[in-house]
Amino acid sequence: MPSHEEMVRAVERYVEAFDKGDAAMASGLYADDATVEDPIGTPIHQGRDAIHAFYTMSMQAGAKLRLDGPVRTGGDYAAFAFTVLVDFGGPKEIEVIDTFKFDAEGKVTEMRAYWSPANMRAVEA
């Protein structure tokens, strides 16, 4: 199981991947058979190719992430709150909580994103 520090570093690299617009960097954090459910209740993206395609689409919208506090870890999970800054017909912020589940090698095997339209708001440009 990865250490607290290793899981925090993976979250930091995830945020960095969005800053760089680097879908390969984001999808490289995942195990080959990983799943992404973003947001909860939507179709699951399974496997690194599907996850890469999902992040490519997300990053084309110019999404940037800002952590809203420390990464919390327990067992093989990390949870983190953050704000997505994106332009959907004008600048918006989306408040999100993600969870990552890690395998023994420190790869993410499951990502779940908790947010809904109720967590989205328009902001000044």
Image: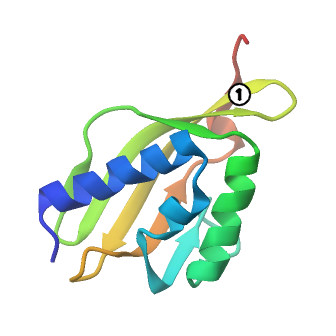
In the image, what residue type sits under mark 1?
Lys
Residue placed at 70% from the left, 69% from the top? 53
At mark 1, the secondary structure is: strand
Looking at this view, name the residue that lies furthest to the bottom.
33
Quarter of the image with the C terminus in it? top right
Say if 63 sits above or below 73 in the image. above
In percent of width and height, residue 63 lies at: 65, 40
| Residue at the disc numbered 1 | 92
Horizontal side of 101 relative to 25 (left or right) equals left
Q: Residue 79, located in which quarter of the rendered image?
A: bottom left
In percent of width and height, residue 28 lies at: 46, 70
Count the labels in the image.
Answer: 1
Residue placed at 34% from the left, 47% from the top? 12
**Residue 95 in view here:** no
In percent of width and height, residue 115 lies at: 58, 48
Say if 73 sits above or below 63 in the image. below
Horizontal side of 74 relative to 67 (left or right) equals left
Say if 70 sits above or below 106 in the image. above
**Residue 92 in view here:** yes
Q: How crowded is mark 1: few (under 14 residues within 10 Å), some or many (20 or more)?
A: some
Camera-side residue: 2 or 112? 2
Residue placed at 53% from the left, 78% from the top? 35
